[in-house]
Amino acid sequence: MSINRRRLSLNLATGLLMETINKISPLLILHHAQKYLGLSGFGWAQYGLALLETLQPFVAYGYTNYAIAEIAREGGILQRCSQLFSSIAVLKTMHALLLILLCLIESSWQLSGLSVSEHIGLLVLILGSTALDAMWFVLVKRKLAIFTALGGLLRLGSLGLMMVLVNEPADKKLFVVLILLPNALMALASGLYAWRQLKWDSPQHLLQVFWGATPFALIAIMLIVYDRFDVLLVKQWFGLEMAGAYAGPARVVQSLIMFTGSIVMAFYAEIVQAQDRESLFKHSSLSLWCLMALATPMVFGAPFVETDAMQLLFTHQMTATHGIFPILCLGIFGNVFIIVFGLQLLQLKAQPWKMIQALVPGLILGPLLAYSLRASLHVHAAAWGVVAGKLLAAVLIVWQARPLIGQFPWSSLSRTWVAGCGMALILKLGNWNGLLQNLLLGALVYLTALIILNRSQVWQIIQHPLIARFWRKNGL
């Protein structure tokens, strides 16, 4: 199966444009929130978000990936989509109601300073919207670009409200609501879209769907824990103020990781249709190259911009958290391998248990390593635990996925890493001061090296019909 470059390029371009907006706005939000909430209030908000985001997969429960795998297996029959939609909607509603009840009973899942009604409101906002989400149908219908654009507009709206309404530590509850609101509205929009397109069918085989989604749910839960356990540990070990200081760079890195989401979603619809080994290798190789082209400058450039970037973004800092940002950035490489060889290969090709087997050792290693190092490395121990866990999982996942593609696409890796090494060397020798200077010099060196080392990929982009039409229109 050949790669549909036109559709893939549209999804990539739209995704990257809106994800740029989506990721700039959270940086502005983080700056504004820490400035006006203070370290303690910001730490409270980030701890609460980490708790709520850890609960979310227990409602989503892997139904999205289960539905995509089922539709791919059965050829995208609309009747099957209707059956899945009704069954999944009922199951997720049951999950949400049960989880809300358990959270109200179990005090450890309750945030200090919130009334019972406020607890219920937050839980309904994040868990109720997750129950309504039908993004799997958006992917099946290939309407990703439209929903990505909608998400960008909602996040800009959230940013505007944040700037106006969050002005003092007492506004920390409102801050949490405004952070959660865009995703909740996106979930609602996807649910309404599916409701209008599909016929409500009598929910069938609920137990079968539940068990079928269970391995996908375990993957989603473990991946959330990978990116959240460090903030939870820092809060427990060192208090809310240190958690607030640590959460700043940690959230920036999570935002950088999520920047790759536009590429991931663009490749999902294509890889679902690919069946033979050659097609899977081509899609995986291109996906790895795209993700690494974005991730490499982030990781190699992090040590050179950390001080200036953190001072620009956050008004409240602690010297104890210096170095957290470049350490956590190393974990981005682990995320790339987990995405390409885990989420895009093992999971979509109905081999989720192999991915689970690879994720478990890393999830055990991370917290244990953090605990063993906390006396000597203090808050940095949590960051090293996250990185070690992700890298171990990445290696094991690549090993498990190797039979699907036959060989590892080394060229997609080496051609981006060589460009990253060249950028880091120039930045080190140049020893420039200032964030803007380092960003401009790093970007110039990296892009030049990337183009030289990846001429075939650049030529494919130049040959895209939209770009070719632009050259002809302007007589170039």
Image: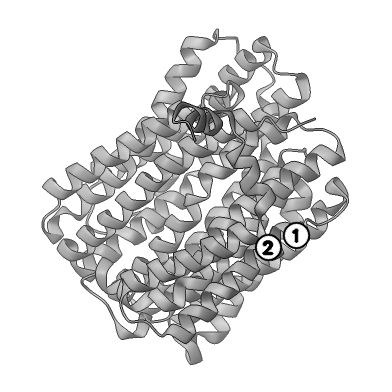
Please give left or right for residue 468 compared with residue 303 in the image: right
Can the viewer see residue 367? no
Compute the Cα span from label 2 to label 1: 6 Å
Location of residue 338 in the rendering, given as x and y in whole percent from the top left corner: 66, 55
> In which quadrant of the rendered image does the N terminus lie?
top right
Query: Residue 60's spot in the image, x, y percent?
Result: 53, 37
Q: Nearer the viewer, residue 341 or 295?
A: 295
Q: Is residue 86 left or right of residue 3?
A: left
For disc 2, the marked residue is 415
Local SS, label 2 = helix
Q: Mark 1 — residue?
A: 411
Residue nearer the viewer, 340 or 283: 283
Residue at image location 51% in from the left, 42% down from the top: 262
Q: Amino acid at mark 1?
A: Ser
Marker disc for residue 118:
none
In this view of the protein, which residue sits in the foreground, 291 or 112? Answer: 291
